């Protein structure tokens, strides 16, 4: 059990508990690590500018850390949360207090455990309202509802990942998706508890949709209703309408819906966008019910109105994903960094390690007796275990990491073509890439077809970035620069790199510390699809990392 206590600048104190709670889903009950006995955990609602103080006491039997996904953490990298990157884990029975300020971000973020696969059940919404006295750039919605899309295993998720690490095979797929913790009517044993989202005729409501699933990008839609997309990853967007959205794990999207349909019941539904050809995935559909307050009361009539089911794109409908992401724009002209100081090119993709000599075949259950792995620029990221990277950096502790992460692929090849098997085995390492304070960074993220191409949701800690272009095939610096949107690209913290394609992002390295960049599919981070930036201090005090907090956990 974890104990969380948080307060904002106006000294409001609240207490929440994370604990092992029996949770029943899909006919089965098992002990689940929860927050306050809640799954998902409590929603944090704050204002832009608030300082949060969150004391976490770990009363569970696993190590844990909490990450505030998308919070910029200016100069407070100590509070970012990824285990062994910015902190050692909070051991069972121990506590750690996270302190950080929300600066200039408005919209929807979320928090989640950042240790092993605990975030399967340890997560919740982090809603950032505009500063006191300012308002949304759209008419104030009547109601606001967080919609947390999750992924459920009928087993302890820690056992699932441990088994995969033992065998080298892909982990078991999930047994259900969930909306606010409930799978919904289309599964056995869960229909009484399906989540109901209220609406009234004529009103406009805001849905804050979060993909908190572990391993699966998801399509999300509502029967007979259009979405007006107004924000993503706590940045506003130029509003546009669509009937379906797609979110990779880690991403959030704020949408307005209007109560303009006959009063009745309509399904909200989510299911997989599975872009890797021939890879097994959870093909189920989760639902919640949009219910008009004036809908005929089923209980009174002794019959239940079956909600209207929306159509959903096919699991491999990449065209719909592309059409959707193309529409994401900042509301107005923005200052995209130009005069790039660091032009980086990172391949992102899977790999297969040959079975080590001393391993039994039971440990090499990947394709053809191999073990799955993954890498960026052929480096498969290995976390340290004795110090956090940030601590090692701040105190100059040698031997924990090196700063030779390659800025370009060590070998150029046809990334999305037929890649020779000799290139499928990456090299393990704890390599960081050093960035000078204030440098203007561009990264081309290039998917590879090693083992399989796939849409990878790549997330950077401590930063938002502009996504200035996306495309398919290999990025071509001669022709593809003409596609760069330097006017109104969207600002995000997680980009879905198109399957068998590339994305180009830009940001200014104005936040000192050690910042993890990784695929937000937990199965891929487990295999090493990550790296970290070391952003050096600037000159003035306000450009330097703060001192570590007194209760900073030791390994
Ligand atoms: Cu939302 Cu490193 O994670």
Image: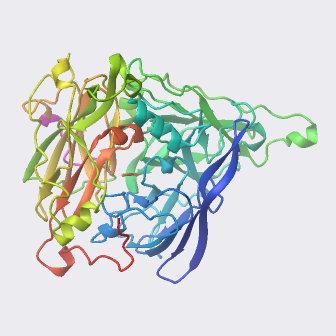
**Figure disc tally:** 0
The residue lying furthest to the bottom in this view is: 11
Q: Quarter of the image containing the N terminus?
A: bottom right
Q: Position of residue 526 (x, y in %)?
A: 36, 41
Q: Residue furthest front?
A: 358
The one nearer the camera, 159 or 437, is 159
Residue 521, located in which quarter of the rendered image?
Answer: top left
Residue at 32% across / 69% down in the picture? 78
Q: Is residue 355 visible?
A: yes
Q: Would you identify the image quadrant in which residue 538 lies? A: bottom left
Residue depicted at x 49% and y 77%: 8
Question: On the picture, is 214 further left or further right than 437?
Answer: right
Task: State whether residue 197 appears in this view.
Answer: no
Q: Is residue 522 left or right of residue 445?
A: right
Q: Position of residue 240 (x, y in %)?
A: 43, 42
Q: Does 308 lie within the magenta span?
A: no
Query: Is 489 inside the magenta-drawn segment?
Result: yes
The residue closer to the viewer here, 410 or 255, is 410
Q: Main secondary structure of the magenta part?
A: loop
Residue depicted at x 41% and y 25%: 362
Observer-nearest residue: 230 or 69? 69
Bounds of the magenta segment: 481-490
Where's the C terminus, which quadrant? Answer: bottom left
């Amino acid at each position: 059990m974890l104990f969380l206590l948080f307060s904002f600048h106006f000294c409001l104190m609240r207490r929440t508990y994370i604990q092992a709670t029996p949770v029943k889903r899909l006919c089965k009950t098992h002990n689940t690590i929860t927050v306050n006995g809640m799954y998902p955990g409590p929603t944090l609602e704050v204002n832009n500018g608030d300082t949060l103080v969150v004391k976490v006491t770990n009363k569970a039997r696993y190590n844990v850390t909490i990450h505030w996904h998308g919070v910029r953490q200016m100069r407070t990298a100590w509070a970012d949360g990824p285990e062994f990157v910015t902190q050692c884990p909070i051991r069972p029975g121990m506590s750690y207090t996270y302190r950080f300020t929300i600066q200039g971000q408005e919209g929807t973020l979320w928090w989640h455990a950042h240790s092993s696969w605990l975030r399967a059940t340890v997560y919740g919404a982090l809603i950032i309202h505009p500063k006191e006295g300012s308002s949304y750039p759209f008419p104030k919605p009547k109601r606001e509802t967080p919609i947390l899309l999750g992924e459920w295993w009928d087993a302890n998720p820690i056992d699932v990942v441990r088994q995969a690490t033992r065998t080298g095979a892909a982990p078991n797929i999930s047994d259900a998706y969930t909306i606010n913790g409930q799978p919904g009517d289309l599964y056995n044993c869960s229909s009484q508890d399906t989540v109901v989202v209220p609406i009234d005729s004529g009103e406009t409501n805001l849905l804050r949709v979060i993909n908190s699933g572990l391993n699966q990008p998801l399509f999300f839609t509502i029967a007979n209703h259009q979405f007006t997309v107004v924000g993503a990853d706590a940045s506003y967007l130029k509003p546009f309408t669509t009937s379906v959205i797609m979110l990779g794990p880690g991403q959030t999207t704020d949408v307005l819906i209007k109560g303009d349909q006959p009063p009745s019941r309509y399904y909200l539904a989510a299911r997989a966008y599975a872009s890797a050809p021939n890879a097994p995935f959870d093909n189920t559909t989760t639902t919640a019910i949009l219910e008009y307050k004036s809908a005929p009361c089923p209980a009174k009539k002794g019959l239940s109105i079956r909600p209207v089911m929306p159509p959903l794109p096919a699991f491999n409908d990449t065209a719909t994903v592309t059409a959707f992401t193309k529409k994401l724009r900042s509301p107005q002209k923005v200052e995209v960094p130009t005069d790039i100081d660091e032009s980086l090119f990172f391949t992102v993709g899977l790999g297969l390690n040959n079975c080590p000599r001393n391993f039994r075949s039971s440990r090499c259950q990947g394709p053809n007796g191999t073990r799955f792995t993954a890498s960026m620029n052929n480096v498969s990221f290995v976390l340290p275990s004795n110090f956090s990277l940030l601590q090692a950096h701040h105190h100059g502790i040698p031997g924990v990491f090196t700063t030779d992460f390659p800025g370009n692929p060590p070998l150029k090849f046809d990334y999305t073509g037929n890649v020779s098997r000799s290139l499928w085995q990456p090299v393990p390492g704890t390599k960081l890439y050093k960035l000078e304070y204030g440098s203007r960074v561009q990264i081309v993220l290039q998917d590879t077809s090693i083992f399989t191409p796939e849409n990878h949701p790549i997330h950077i800690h401590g930063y938002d970035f502009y996504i200035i272009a996306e495309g398919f095939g290999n990025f071509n610096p001669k022709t593809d620069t003409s596609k760069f949107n330097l006017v109104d690209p969207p600002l995000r913290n997680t980009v879905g790199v198109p399957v068998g394609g590339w994305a180009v992002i830009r940001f200014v390295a104005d936040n000192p510390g050690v910042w993890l960049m990784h695929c937000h599919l937990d199965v891929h981070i487990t295999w090493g699809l990550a790296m970290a930036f070391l952003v050096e201090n600037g000159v003035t005090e306000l450009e330097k990392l703060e001192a570590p907090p007194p209760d900073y956990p030791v390994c």
